[in-house]
Amino acid sequence: MEGLLAQIRQCRICESHLPFGPRPVMTAGPDARLLIIGQAPGSKVHASGIPWDDQSGKNLRDWLGMDPDVFYDPTQVALVPMGFCYPGTGQSGDLPPRRECAPTWHQAVLTAMPNIRLTLLIGAYSQAYYLGKDRPKTLTETVRNFEAYLPRYLPLPHPSPRNNIWLRKNPWFEQDLVPILKEKVREMF
């Protein structure tokens, strides 16, 4: 695993498309039981080099009911984005994750973590990649039908503050799904 992580940290496949240069950000360990697949690092995470080191990460840890010490322990939790580097900003927020990362690196990372018991698919990009044709057309429908993907996957919306409107429109998420998510996490740790 250490050799693989070193290779990922040296990756320059899409360097010419990254306005702030490559800085792959992820953590993983061979004994991790929970895998969290997000989108791509934002500008704050790019600056710190720590996955989910922003308000989205705080919101996610709240949803999980998880202490930062456990969340950032690669022997327990793997934090693997769809795109390992900050893609830059577009007209309405960060650009999508670069398409090169997941097909290049994910299978090797997953193979190196045989103890994963649950994978959280955060946002539409990871859901499209991992669920493919087996998912409904919208993120809302996919998350609402989360039980169809258990026990392997649990799809979630992105915990970004930009999604507060979605959360207000879908109160069932925090009322019904978040308690189930917390229970599943408690069972694992």
Image (cartoon, rainbow, N blue to C red):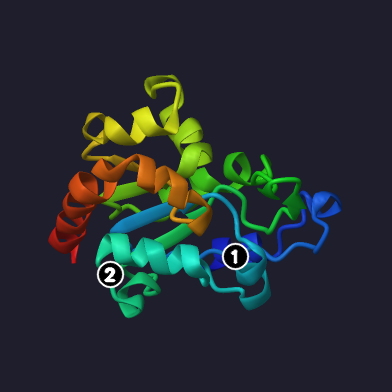
Q: Please, which residue is most extreme toward the bottom here?
A: 69
1 and 2 marks in contact (CB < 8 Å): no
Which residue is labeled 2 in the image? 66
Disc on res. 9? none
Left-right relation of 36 to 31: right
The local secondary structure at tag 2 comes to loop
Crowding around mark 2 (Cα neighbors within 10 Å: few <14, some 14 to 19, many 20+) is some
Residue type for callout 1: Val
User: Distance from label 1 to label 2 (Cα)?
Assistant: 20 Å
Single out the mark in the foreground, 1 or 2.
2
Q: Residue at x 68, y 45 (%)?
A: 98
Residue 122 visible at all: no
**Image height of 100 relative to 183, above or below:** above
Q: Residue at x 21, y 59 (%)?
A: 185
Q: Quadrant of residue 179?
A: bottom left
The number of numbered badges drawn on the structure is: 2
Residue 187, image x, y percentages:
13, 59
- The quarter of the image holding the C terminus is bottom left
51 or 76: nearer the viewer: 51
Q: Residue at x 53, y 38 (%)?
A: 125
Residue 5 visible at all: yes
**Image height of 45 relative to 120, above or below:** below
Crowding around mark 1 (Cα neighbors within 10 Å: few <14, some 14 to 19, many 20+) is many
Q: Residue at x 38, y 47 (%)?
A: 167
82 or 135: nearer the viewer: 135
Left-right relation of 95 to 21: left
Residue type for callout 2: Met
Residue 66, image x, y percentages:
28, 70
Which residue is labeled 1 in the image? 25
Residue 109, image x, y percentages:
48, 52
